[in-house]
């Protein structure tokens, strides 16, 4: 069989299978497990700080309650984002995007920022993200993905140097025309929608195909062989050995 390199490993919200999602400890765990890409989610606080959390509310992952957009960054910093995962992660904090950018400074790991828009919408979030990527000059190692494709269009209009990717979990009409119009660097379909045909078509347009969320070895091997560029997983450490094989 011809040697082909394994898919890149994308740590979903860090290493959320074994550490509290979207916390510095989760990202550090993913780094320790030799992940290629770290994925995180971004919302805006009341005082317009980029908050790294998945839900529009803090209730599920922290000891607090309420909408992120109604809380100041100081209030958010007081929340415990580890205790609900496990007592041993007590006092893990909700990070701001800037803290993660600092953590990743000086290493080669890439960053996938998922821009959250809806059901709560954040006017001006695209400008904030654009400024942050510019501040850290991390154009070559950052990609911004979103289910809100209009938001990605706005981001691209603001700063066309930022690589973007559409997230989707359904079939889209006139797909080639659609991705060309949005000027994306990658597509991020749910794995249901990944086919060899899609990969061929996108690679022919120089667009990467990254999928989510794969947590079994069998599926990892299947999509890797199919030619998927990066695979999102909650357990990045489980798949590092595949990549290490690619002498």
Image (spheres, helix red, strand yellow):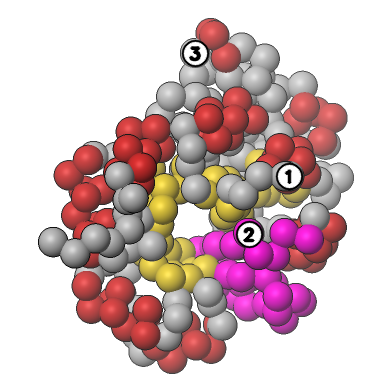
Give the number of the disc on residue 105. 1
Q: Do the residues labelled 3 and 1 touch (CB within 8 Å)?
A: no
Quadrant containing the N terminus is bottom left
Task: Give the magenta range.
Answer: 137-164
- Mark 3 and mark 1: span between their CA atoms? 28 Å
User: SS of the residue at dot 2?
Assistant: strand
Give the vertical position of 201 relative to 63 (above or below): below
**In terms of depth relative to the viewer, which is nearer, 119 or 189?**
189
Q: Place residue 134 in its image quadrant.
A: bottom right
Residue at the spot of label 2: 142
Answer left or right for 70 relative to 43.
right
Residue 234 can be seen, yes or no: no
Give the vertical position of 83 relative to 77 (above or below): above
**In terms of depth relative to the viewer, which is nearer, 91 or 68?**
91
Q: Label 1: how many residues lie within 10 Å, few (<14), some (14-19) or many (20+)?
A: few
x and y percentages locating residue 232 in the rendered image: 40, 49
Which mark sits nearer the N-terminus, 3 or 1? Answer: 3
Q: Place residue 92 in its image quadrant.
A: top right
Q: Label 3: how many residues lie within 10 Å, few (<14), some (14-19) or many (20+)?
A: few
Residue at the spot of label 3: 86
Residue 205 can be seen, yes or no: yes
Which mark sits nearer the N-terminus, 2 or 3? Answer: 3
User: Residue at 75% across / 30% down in the picture?
Assistant: 76
């Amino acid at each position: 069989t011809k040697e082909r390199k394994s898919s890149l490993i994308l740590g979903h919200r860090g290493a959320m299978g074994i550490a509290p999602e979207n916390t510095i400890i989760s990202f550090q765990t993913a780094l320790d497990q030799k992940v290629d890409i770290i994925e995180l989610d971004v919302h805006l606080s009341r005082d317009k700080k980029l908050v790294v959390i998945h839900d529009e509310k803090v209730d599920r992952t922290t000891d607090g309650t309420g909408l992120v957009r109604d809380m100041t960054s100081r209030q958010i910093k007081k929340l415990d984002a580890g205790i609900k995962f496990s007592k041993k992660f007590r006092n893990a904090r909700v990070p701001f995007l800037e803290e993660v950018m600092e953590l990743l400074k000086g290493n080669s790991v890439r960053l996938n920022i998922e821009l959250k828009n809806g059901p709560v919408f954040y006017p001006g979030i695209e400008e904030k993200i654009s400024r942050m990527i510019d501040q850290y000059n991390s154009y070559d190692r950052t990609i911004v993905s979103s289910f809100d494709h209009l938001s990605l269009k706005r981001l691209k209009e603001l700063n066309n140097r930022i690589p973007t990717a559409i997230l989707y979990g359904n079939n889209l009409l006139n797909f080639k025309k659609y991705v060309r119009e949005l000027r994306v660097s990658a597509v991020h379909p749910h794995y249901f929608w990944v086919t060899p045909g899609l990969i061929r078509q996108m690679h022919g347009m120089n667009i990467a195909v990254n999928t989510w969320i794969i947590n079994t070895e069998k599926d990892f091997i299947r999509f890797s062989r199919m030619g998927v560029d990066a695979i999102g997983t909650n357990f990045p450490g489980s798949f590092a050995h595949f990549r290490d094989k690619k002498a």
